[in-house]
Amino acid sequence: MDVTTQIIRHILNSSLETIPEKAIERAKLSIVDTIACAIGGSNDPIAHFARQLGALSGGKPECTVWISGKKLPSSLAVLVNATTARALDFDDTYEIGINGCHASAYDVPPALALAERDRSITGGELLSALATAIDLHIRLSRSITTNAIDTGRDNMVAVWGATAVSAKLLRLDEEKTRNAFGIAYAHAAGEFQMYEEGAHTVALQQGLRARSGVESALSAMVGFNGPREPFFGKYGFYNAFEPDYDRNMLMDKLGSDYVNASISFKPWPSCRATHHGIDGLLQLREEHDFVGDDVVSIELGLNQRAGSVVAEPRDQKWNPADPVVARFSLPYVVAVAAQRGSVTIGDFSAEALKDPAVRQIMAATKIVVDPEIDRTHGRFGNSPTTVNVKLKSGAQHFIRIDKPFGHPESPASLADGVQKLKACAAASMLPFSEKQLELVGELIDDLDKRPTLAPLFELLVGGR
């Protein structure tokens, strides 16, 4: 049996009964986290642009634009919601591969849109589709053995995660699902220049790929076909774009080991490669009871790859002029942690970026390549980080962080996700009541027992 057939049959045959409980529970957290990030990012300029883009086309009012409550065709609602969920770079990510992978915020918006479009979809169906799609999305991502920092090709596989969840929830048969995967190949894209320049497309590309997944499945549903060998054909994805790959990372234990359970939760709204430094600084600050004014200098050590994203170019990272650059600035977020004892959505406002106390600590922050970390973890975009803080008292404190909070070996719970949901609501474009947010958490907690998701969508609208 060829690989594409194995993948498609796995997608179609997975169910709540065949998927490990840990993977189902992690899918619940993915839903809460994606909704939280969209609510928290709803007042960001990127989210406003996304809603304006959706409104330009309009169309059949079948699916909810979260927070605003506007209605759009499913694929447009997915575009807006997925872009908004990535606006703050607060959404969870797979960090233990060579390349990061923000699978949840690609795949949750299509899943929820299609469940709103078809109220007969049960909570169990949605969770099994989501766990299966995110698992495939990550497997495709981790199978690529070159780093996007080197090639400039970033997460081109994302469209197949969104296609998988869409095909399963549209209940396509094997032939139409295969066509959906072939059609999705025509949508496959992804580039790294957006990170280099701190462009809005860091978030927009997520919405574009999520929309493409829905449209690929809908295209197959109405009768379009696509290439039957989109992965390993003569001109398939791997041969055409990623010839350096590990097929075992794609196929090993497919159907038994659901790697969606290994996604990392993000407690702070910045690039995951900055979280090791934030976690280390906050631990030192709490243990040794110092504040920002006590700091003389901070030195951070990590691998070269991560440093090239969060510490270069130097003129931007030590002087972030806008929120997108600041979220990818290790010196900025560590200085914020030192000064304020936390890193929150509000720390990326235009006013916060100018804080002279933070700027002073940032100027005293040095980032170096740690030779040992570079030797042992040099291939990875997320790096263990050493934190060395010198204080005015003469004291010097050091810590190394390999697995910050949210790592699969230091995991978050659904309760942590609900707490994040409530924290994000404080930054929402429209208000959400405490009770409303608690109901969202309760509904998702027992989603596997729900005959429909219909009650959820009203809860995702603010200002009620």
Image (cartoon, grey):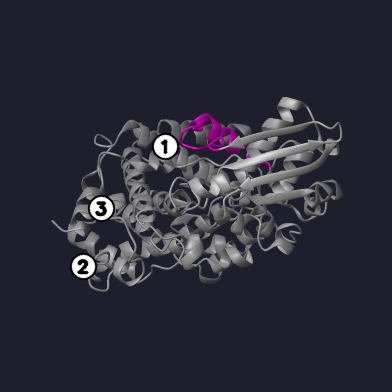
Q: Is residue 171 left or right of residue 126?
A: left
Q: Over which residues does the magenta segment extend?
A: 402-427
Which residue is found at the position 35% from the left and 47% from the top? 135
Disc 3 residue crowd, few under 14, some 14–19, many 20+, Cα 10 Å: some
Residue at disc 2, secondary structure: loop
* x, y percent for residue 127: 35, 41
Disc 2 residue crowd, few under 14, some 14–19, many 20+, Cα 10 Å: some
- The relative height of residue 236 versus residue 161 in the rendered view (above or below) is below
* x, y percent for residue 35: 52, 45
Q: In the rendered structure, are the residues bearing label 2 and label 1 in contact, judged by CB atoms less than 8 Å apart?
A: no
Q: Earlier in the sequence, mark 2 or mark 1?
A: 1
Q: CA distance from mark 3 to mark 2?
A: 19 Å
Residue at the extreme left:
1
Q: Quadrant where the C terminus lies?
A: top right
Residue 425 in the magenta stretch? The answer is: yes
User: Please, what is the three-letter code of the amino acid marked with disc 3?
Assistant: Arg
* x, y percent for residue 372: 55, 45
Q: Which residue position is annotated with label 1?
A: 26
Q: Which residue position is annotated with label 3?
A: 171
User: Please, what is the three-letter code of the amino acid marked with disc 1?
Assistant: Arg
Residue at disc 3, secondary structure: loop
Q: Which residue position is annotated with label 2?
A: 228
